[in-house]
Amino acid sequence: MCFKKDIIQMTTTIKFRMNPGDEELSPKKAHHDDAAYDVRASVDAVLHAGKVGLVPTGMYLELPEGFEAQIRPRSGLALKHGISVLNSPGTIDAGYRGEVRVILLNTSGADFPVKRGDRIAQMVIQKLPEIELVRVEELSESKRGAGGFGSTGVG
């Protein structure tokens, strides 16, 4: 016997605006089932070899309280050109209303041109769980304990 569960889809509205003239750079998903929105550069720039650059997007977000946006690297840029988001993932808090800018790192040995409209990062928007941190004198034991930083012998 097969039971079909009713799935209730709840949509959260996220407001955003673009700088005048940057409307075509609005964040978009390449496919309807993608997890992330493509984020585009709003200017031409050069990321010099081994250097960090701050690239504007022309985008401003109004996230509801209890949500965050994460700016993450694009796998193709990382693999093919050594371009990554330095503080990955970069967090955009609900209270921030400034322009979303992306901190890119060029890990390669060659300068990398960024053209206006290039997809430079991806953005995932998530609801945050309600958390209460409780200070205690002792923590429970676990199998792993304090082992970290390669303690399993891998990496």
Image (spheres, rainbow, N blue to C red):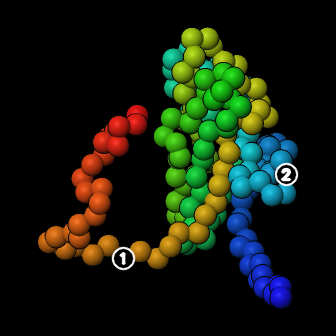
What secondary structure is found at the residue carrying circle 2? Answer: loop
Q: Residue at horizontal 27%, vertical 49%? A: 147
**Neighbour class for label 1 at 10 Å: few (<14), some, many (≥20)?**
few
Q: Residue at horizontal 52%, vertical 64%? A: 95
Marking on residue 142: none
**Neighbour class for label 2 at 10 Å: few (<14), some, many (≥20)?**
few
x then y, percent, for residue 60: 66, 53
Question: Which amino acid type corresponds to the residue marked 2 in the rendered image?
Answer: His
x then y, percent, for residue 49: 56, 14
Q: Nearer the viewer, residue 66 or 107?
A: 107
Question: Which amino acid type corresponds to the residue marked 1 in the rendered image?
Answer: Glu
Tell me where residue 72 sits by quadrant. top right
Q: Is residue 118 left or right of residue 136?
A: right
Q: Is residue 56 visible?
A: no
Q: Nearer the viewer, residue 154 or 114?
A: 154
Q: Is residue 112 above or below residue 79?
A: above
x then y, percent, for residue 16: 72, 59
Task: Single out the residue that lies furthest toward the front.
Answer: 1
**Which residue in the structure is indicated by mark 1?**
132
Q: Residue at horizontal 73%, vertical 71%? A: 13
Q: Is residue 31 visible?
A: yes
Q: Nearer the viewer, residue 130 or 136?
A: 136
- Disc 1 + disc 2, Cβ < 8 Å: no
x then y, percent, for residue 132: 36, 76
The N terminus lies in which quarter of the figure?
Answer: bottom right
Dot 1 or dot 2: first in sequence order is 2
**Which residue in the structure is indicated by mark 2?**
31
What secondary structure is found at the residue carrying circle 1? Answer: loop
Q: Is residue 144 above or below residue 39?
A: below
The C terminus lies in which quarter of the figure?
Answer: top left
Q: Is residue 89 above or below residue 106?
A: below
Q: Determine the CA span between mark 1 and mark 2.
A: 36 Å
